[in-house]
Amino acid sequence: MRRRLTTIAHAESCRFPPNEEDEVLSEILSLSGGDMRRAVTSLQSAHSLSSGGTIKKDAIAEMAGLPPTDIVEALLESLKSGNFDSMEREVMNVIAEGFAAHNVFMELSKAFIG
């Protein structure tokens, strides 16, 4: 799948940050869950929505509705602190951003598991 997605990206003149093409395509493939049509659709969407014409890894996660790494890390740190006010503030931040609870829990579980 990676080879085919790379071929499509080059045929569509997709641009990536220097030395990040593999990382971006890996993110697309990971989020597609093995579905080639979904991977191609994600690539097309990222290409058309990319600012400055460059597809970035963070944009892929955002497009999929996943919370950015900094939000997950802040939430994780507040949970580790044991400070209720800090936890409440970060949870309210996640709610304000509008991320689905399912996606937030998935990202938190990845952070815990490593």
Image (spheres, grey):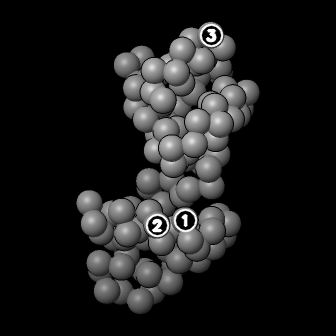
SS type, badge 1: helix
Residue at horizontal 57%, vertical 27%? 55
Quarter of the view holding residue 87: bottom left
Give the Cα distance between marks 3 and 1: 32 Å
- Name the disc covering residue 11, or none: 3
Q: Is residue 33 visible?
A: yes
- Real-space Cα separation, disc 2 to disc 1, in angstroms: 5 Å
Q: Which residue is mark 1?
A: 103
In this rendering, the label closer to the viewer, 2 or 3: 3
Q: Nearer the viewer, residue 85 or 106?
A: 106
Labelled disc at residue 106: 2
Residue at the location (54% across, 58% down)? 67
Q: Amino acid at mark 1?
A: Asn
The residue lying at 51 percent from left, 44 percent from top is 34
In the image, taking residue 25 as reference, residue 80 lies left or right, namely left
- The furthest residue to the left: 114
Q: Indicate the secondary structure of the residue bearing disc 2.
A: helix
Where 90 sits versus 21, above or below? below
Residue 86 x %, y %: 43, 80
| Label located before the other in sequence (2 or 3) | 3
Q: Secondary structure at mark 3?
A: helix
Looking at the picture, which amino acid does disc 3 mark? Ala
